Amino acid sequence: MTSKRVLTFPLEDREILLSLKVGEFVYLSGWLLCGRDATHKKILEALKSEGFNFDFTNQIIYYVGPTPPPPGKIIGACGPTTSSRMDPYIEDFFKLGICATMGKGKRSGKVKELHKLYKAVYFITFGGAGAYLSQFVKKVEPIAWEDLGPEAFFRIKVEDFPAIVGIDTEGRDFYELSSANFPA
């Protein structure tokens, strides 16, 4: 039996990403930055105009827009959103120091090449399981643009959040490899 593989973000040493292989099941702990399309656009605009000051080094962005928390909970359902919508922004975020992203669905060929270039990883988590995933969230902290609701820039502290390596640092793609094993 293999041991449980836990990655803690932000990473102390980015080199650990080089050892991850596409299709590998991992658990994420620590702080995950969170945002979707509007957040990505606002961050890049703010960096250009307002000098937005935030350290993205060795951080991960989870593509999520949670539902409002039910009474007594800190977060509502927090399942992943479709990652390809963030493809136009990914290189800018890699240049800022982001080392990993997480969401659901396929990424473009260009994004796979950028993962190789920047030695970054794309994690997939379970779509349609937002209520289940919320149990791994231990704390929620706003960062900016709270008025955007679920599109705000915030971070969540997680413990043993489940994920699969969707694209590794060599650009190998889980969706391509899994479809090769299950011909039509």
Image (cartoon, grey):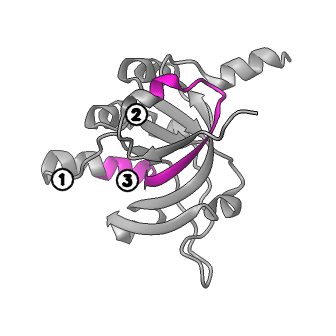
Task: Please tell me whether residue 92 is drawn above or below residue 126 in the rendered image.
Answer: above
Residue 18: image x %, image y %? 46, 23
Q: Are marks 2 and 1 in contact (CB under 8 Å)?
A: no
**What's the residue at 46%, 61% (across, down)?**
156
First of labels 2, 1 by sequence position:
1
Residue 149 in view in this figure:
no
Q: How many marks?
A: 3
At x 26%, y 45%, the residue is 44
Quadrant holding the C terminus: top right
Name the quadrant of the N terminus: top right
* x, y percent for residue 137: 55, 63
Q: Is residue 168 left or right of residue 2?
A: left
Do the residues under discs 3 and 1 have CB atoms within 8 angstroms?
no
Q: Dot 3 corresponds to which residue?
A: 39
Q: Which residues are magenta?
A: 17-42
Secondary element under disc 2, as helix, strand or loop, is helix
Q: Residue furthest bottom?
A: 71
Q: Inspect the magenta stretch and tell me whether residue 112 lies in it.
A: no
Q: Earlier in the sequence, mark 2 or mark 3?
A: 3
| Crowd around label 3: few <14 · some 14–19 · many ≥20 (10 Å) | many
Inspect the image, locate mark 2, and give the three-letter code of the amino acid beneath it. Pro
Task: Pick whichever, 28 or 93, lies toward us.
Answer: 28
Residue beneath disc 1: 53
State whether residue 158 is above or below residue 141.
Answer: above
SS category of the residue bearing label 3: helix
Q: Which residue is mark 2?
A: 88
Queried whether the magenta region covers residue 33, the answer comes back as yes
The amino acid marked with disc number 3 is: Thr
Mark 2 vs mark 1, foreground winner is 1
Mark before the other along the chain sequence, 3 or 1 = 3
Instruction: Tell me which residue sits at (42%, 44%) in the image.
Output: 60
